[in-house]
């Protein structure tokens, strides 16, 4: 049941992450902690660590980057996959 943390570099600010997390994490309860969040649901928990990274600069465009680590406790592989599917769906940013 133990897996390595999932690490993502996300093209968004920490504020946008904060605003999106509640809907992406239903049915977990969310508690803000010093370096991110602690999510709990029944006997399972997810520790989310956030770190602001240097922005990506493409031509004249500057994009914020947030490094996110999700560390799952007491989850099966199927539960992790199900959570990550919803997480990615809510955090997906389209481009043109």
Image: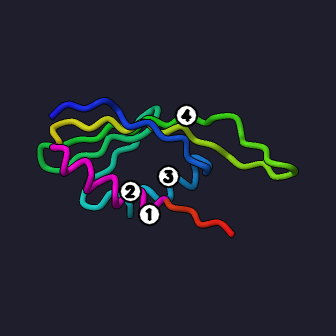
Mark 4, other Cα within 10 Å: few <14 / some 14–19 / many ≥20: some
Q: Is residue 84 left or right of residue 57?
A: left
Mark 1, other Cα within 10 Å: few <14 / some 14–19 / many ≥20: some
What's the CA distance linking mark 3 and mark 2? 13 Å
Task: State the residue in front, 53 or 7.
Answer: 7
Residues at discs 3 and 4 in contact (Cβ within 8 Å): no
Q: Is residue 51 left or right of residue 37?
A: right
Query: Which residue is the extreme one toward the bottom?
Result: 96
How far across and down, in percent of the image, does residue 39 sit?
29, 45
Task: State the residue in front, 65 or 22.
Answer: 65
- Residue 94 vertical position relative to residue 55 in the rendered view, above or below: below
How far across and down, in percent of the image, does residue 78 sit?
18, 50
Q: What is the number of the mark on residue 90?
A: 1
Quarter of the image for the N terminus: give it. Answer: top left
Q: Which residues are magenta?
A: 76-91
Residue position for label 2: 87
Query: Which comes sooner in the sequence, label 4 or label 2?
Result: 4
Residues at discs 1 and 2 in contact (Cβ within 8 Å): yes
Q: Nearer the viewer, mark 3 or mark 1?
A: 1
Q: What is the number of the mark on residue 51?
A: 4
Residues at discs 4 and 1 in contact (Cβ within 8 Å): no
Determine whether the residue tagged by mark 1 lies in a helix, strand or loop.
helix
Residue at image coords 81%, 52%: 61
Residue at image coords 29%, 61%: 26
Check if residue 75 falls in the magenta segment. Answer: no
Task: State the residue in front, 53 or 92.
Answer: 92
């Amino acid at each position: 049941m133990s897996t390595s943390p999932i690490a993502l570099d996300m093209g968004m600010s920490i504020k946008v992450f904060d605003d999106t997390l509640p809907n992406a994490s239903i049915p977990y309860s969310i508690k803000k902690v010093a370096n991110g969040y602690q999510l709990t649901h029944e006997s399972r928990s997810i520790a989310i660590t956030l770190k602001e990274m240097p922005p990506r600069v493409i031509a004249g465009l500057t994009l914020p980057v947030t490094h996110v680590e999700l560390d799952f406790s007491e989850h099966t592989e199927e539960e992790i996959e199900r959570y990550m599917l919803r997480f990615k769906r809510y955090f997906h940013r389209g481009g043109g």
